[in-house]
Image (cartoon, rainbow, N blue to C red):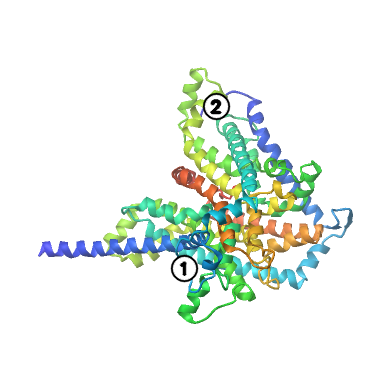
Amino acid sequence: MAASKRTAYWYRKRGMLLLLHVGLIISAFLISAPVLFALIKSTQTTAQIFSYPPTFAIGPAAPENYAIAWKDYHLGRLMLNTFIIAGAVTVGKTLMSLLAALALVYFEFPFKNLLFVFVLITLMMPIPVRIVPLFDLVRSFGWGNTHWALVIPFLASATGVFLFRQHFMSIPASLVDAARVDGIGPMRFLWQILVPMSMNTIGAMAVIQFVYIWNQYLWPLIIIASNEKQMIQIGLKMLTGAGPEGMLNWGVAMAGTIITMLPPLIVFMLLQEQFMRGFALAEEK
Amino acid sequence: MRSKFPSKWLPYLLLLPTLALCAIFLYYPVIQTFRLSTYRAILMGLHRKYVGFENYVRLFTSADYLHSFTITFIFAVGVVVLGLAISLAIALLANHKIRGARIYRLLLIWPYALSPAVAGSIWLFLLNPTAGVVNYFMKALFGISPDWLTDGRLALLAVTIAAMWKNLGYNIVFFLAGLQNLPGEILEAARVDGAGPWTTFWRVTFPLLSPTTFFLLIMNLIYAFFGGFGLIMVMTEGGPNKATNILIFNLYQDAFRFHKWGLAAAQSVILFIMVVALTLIQFRTTGRRVHYGGQ
């Protein structure tokens, strides 16, 4: 009696488990399907792309499609630009946020909270709410159509200061006492003790910033005039705009789209554990 | 009281780069935006004339701008309601401790790294009447082939779905974090009391999760107001016939295609007021949580 009851429970649980797996597989498939479709079509010839009914097999045109996107549409050049800019902003933001958070957590000084709030309020100031004067200002510095315009205005980070401050406050205070007894100054304390203890937060910060800068659209569109200095997202528009005969080569367009999405995706995949843990730490309990 | 390093000037020096850049590139342009919004300024600001609130009056009496407001509202509600419902359902599935849970989680959240422009480019292709796959299935299943990007209403639906899809990863990350932080004892107690999964969800899980849901509601609204630009640019350029001309796209056009700086600045101020209102509501209701937009 008891045994059969247990078996029934076991079967019901197994059934539920199976259902759960099926549900998750379907969800993952539906979320990924648009990109999978783009990936498959990026390997097909134009004839295959326009065939009816559509084929979902890998085609032979991948080398050609990717080569055209890379060379003829200069995605290689745009990618290099975007790498330099996203790398510079990510490193610069992380360093500046670390320094600011060090000041806010490990020093006592007048107007400390006020200055923190001053930084935090900038969260409410995305580019579009200041775009016209920012455009004027950056051009008055002579930075119009230069990479300075894409880096310097982005180096201050309320998100970064907030994340690192939050993380530093969760580190035991006794550490500072020990450091001071050993005669370690604040800068050595930061590099040798705090930074190694903050790798999750630094990883999360790197993902957030790199993805954000890589995926920017509006600001580079207006401030960069010459194609060889442009960022890669704006290059997408050339690929999906109609070609000379009003017909567009979708295989090349999708190859370009895949190239464009790859770097932030790789950064995200490599750092996703830190990203998730960095998130969990930032939650206020 | 935690112990500190004793220095009077070093903390200011450490904060200086951040404070200076905030002042120059964030506060100053925002203040200038307010000032500029009271001028009629065209041609790179060479001709400017103080006009008080005229720009605002022009906006709120313009049928085009009010239309843009309505469009943005529909777009935002679609992105929020569809996006939150779907990602919560998926997060509930992914929150079980089963074999492969980490792999599933990764497969569900990876679109976080995609850009709105990439999402736009892919959906432009999916919805293409001849090469795309959506209409193939539409025809096979329902015998219809909708003109996704040439019919105004369908175009709005299309950009809403594309924008919503792109943000699923972000939402699932936060819902999963929220679900993992729920007090296990309460859920266990509900189960012991014989509450079924449906009752447990609506009576226990959903109310306990409301801070996360509310936080995501605000973040998705801000995303819909600002994040949609690249997507609209690639998919529709605000068309057909302004059917997807959301506020941010209208602002871009007035500023950088028609060079109506004053009018554009007034639109920036309106967007700023909306962000401030949303952020204050979020701060007051769910406590201090920063948004991970990369600012």
Label annotation for residue B4: 2
For the residue carrying disc 2, how many other residues have a C-alpha within 10 Å: few (<14), some (14-19), or many (20+)?
some
Is A194 left, or right, of A22 in this rendering?
Answer: right
Label annotation for residue A55: 1
The residue positioned 68% from the left and 70% from the top of the image is: B239
Residue B234 locus on image (x, y percent): 64, 62
Is A116 left, or right, of A43 in this rendering?
Answer: right
Going by the numbered disc 2, the residue's amino acid type is Lys
Query: In front: mark 2 or mark 1?
Result: 1
State whether residue B223 appears in this view: yes
Quadrant assignment for the N terminus of chain A: bottom left
Local secondary structure at mark 2 = loop
Given residues B199 and B108, the one toward you in this image is: B108
Q: Do labels 2 and 1 touch, CB within 8 Å?
A: no
For the residue carrying disc 1, how many other residues have a C-alpha within 10 Å: few (<14), some (14-19), or many (20+)?
some
The residue positioned 59% from the left and 61% from the top of the image is: B121
Query: In the rendered structure, the residue with mark 1 lies on which chain?
Result: A
Going by the numbered disc 1, the residue's amino acid type is Thr
Q: Is residue B197 above or below residue A280?
A: below
Is B145 left, or right, of B230 in this rendering?
Answer: left
Given residues B3 and B133, the one toward you in this image is: B133
Q: How far apart are marks 2 and 1 (CA)?
A: 66 Å
